[in-house]
Image: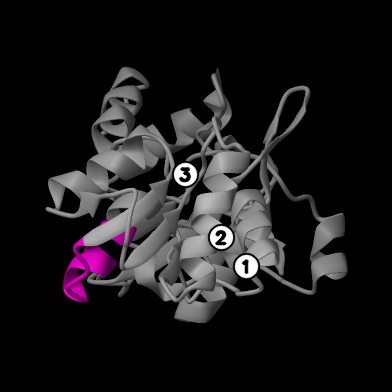
Amino acid sequence: MRALKPEDLENFSTILCDLDGVVWREKNVIWENVNALRELKGRGKRLIFITNNSSRKPDDYWERLRELGIEADMIITSSTATANYLVKRGIKRVYAIGEEGLFWALESNGIEICEEEPQTVVVGIDRTFNYEKLKKASNFVYFGALFVATNLDAHVREENGILPGAGSIVSAISYASGKKPDVVIGKPNRYIFENLDLNGAVLIGDNLETDILAGKNLGIPTVLVLTGVHKLEDVERLKIEPDFYVENLQQL
C-alpha cells in the first residue's frame, strides 16, 4: 500500500467509484473529490458509479451527479443489481423490506411485491423498519423463502455520527429466523459487478470492508479515499489492504 500519485491513474481507463463517502456524505458534497472526478472525466476516463445504497432510483443519482457537473457513464445500485439477479433466476414474487429505490427496481423488472407466500424475502435499507416487518420477514425466511440482502453495510457515516445500514436490518431478521442470507448482492460480492468489463479498471472507495474488499475479490487495483468510513489505522485492524490510498482525490 502506498500513497496514490497522479501518474498512477494514467494506467486505468475506467474508474469504478463509490458514492456515499466519496462524492458526498448524505447532503454534504465532498467538493475535493467531485472536482477531481470531473477532471478525470475530462481526461477521457470512463466513470461508473457503484453504490450499495438501495434507497434511491438510478435517475436520482444521475440528476444529482449532473447538478455537480459529473457526467457518469453508468450507475449501478444494489437495488438494480438485486432485481437483475432475481429476474435471471425466474423469481417473480417477493416480500420486500426497503424504500423507493428497491421497490422501483423490482416492479420495473416485473417482480411482484407481495405480503403472502413470497418466493423470496428481499431486504434493503428501510428507515420505517418496525417489529411487524421483522416478524413477517423472519417467518417467511424461517419457513423456507429465499433470503436475499441487497447489502450488508452496517452503517454510513454522517457529520454527527452514523446511520444504521441495511446490514443492521438483515442481522435482525437473520438472528430471529436463525438463517443467514442465501445471497448478498452488493459490494464486496461479485453480483453487483455482473456484466461489467473490468479490463483497465480501478476501484475507488471509502470503505475497506465493501469497496476495497470488492476490488480484491475481483482482482483489480483499489484506492482507499479517506473521506468516509475508514481511515489508515483501520487497515491493520481489519487486515484489508488497498493498493493505494489518498486523503482526498483533489491531491491528484
Q: What residue lies at 53% left-to-right and 34% top-to-bottom?
A: 33
Give yes or no for contact between labels 2 and 1 (Cβ–Cβ under 8 Å).
Answer: yes
Residue 188: x and y in percent read: 53, 68
Precedes in sequence: disc 3 or disc 2? 3
Residue 161: x and y in percent read: 78, 29
Q: Does the magenta stretch include residue 246?
A: no
Specify few, some or many for label 1: CA neighbours under 10 Å numbering under 14, 14-19, or 20 or more.
Answer: some
The residue under label 1 is 177
Is residue 11 at all visible to an observer of this figure? no
Identify the amino acid type marked 2: Ser
Q: Quadrant of residue 66?
A: top left
Specify few, some or many for label 3: CA neighbours under 10 Å numbering under 14, 14-19, or 20 or more.
Answer: many
The residue under label 3 is 53
> Disc 3 or disc 2, which is closer to the eye?
2
Label placed on residue 51:
none
User: Quarter holding the C terminus?
Assistant: top right
Picture layout, residue 157 above or below residue 67: below
Q: What residue lies at 54% left-to-right and 38% top-to-bottom?
A: 20
Identify the amino acid type marked 1: Ser
Left or right of 91? Residue 152 is right
Find the magenta span and give its range: 81-92
Q: What residue lies at 87% left-to-right and 66% top-to-bottom?
A: 237
> Disc 3 or disc 1, which is closer to the eye?
1
Q: Mostly what secondary structure, the magenta segment?
A: helix
Q: How far apart are marks 2 and 1 (CA)?
A: 5 Å
Q: Which element is circle 1 on?
A: helix
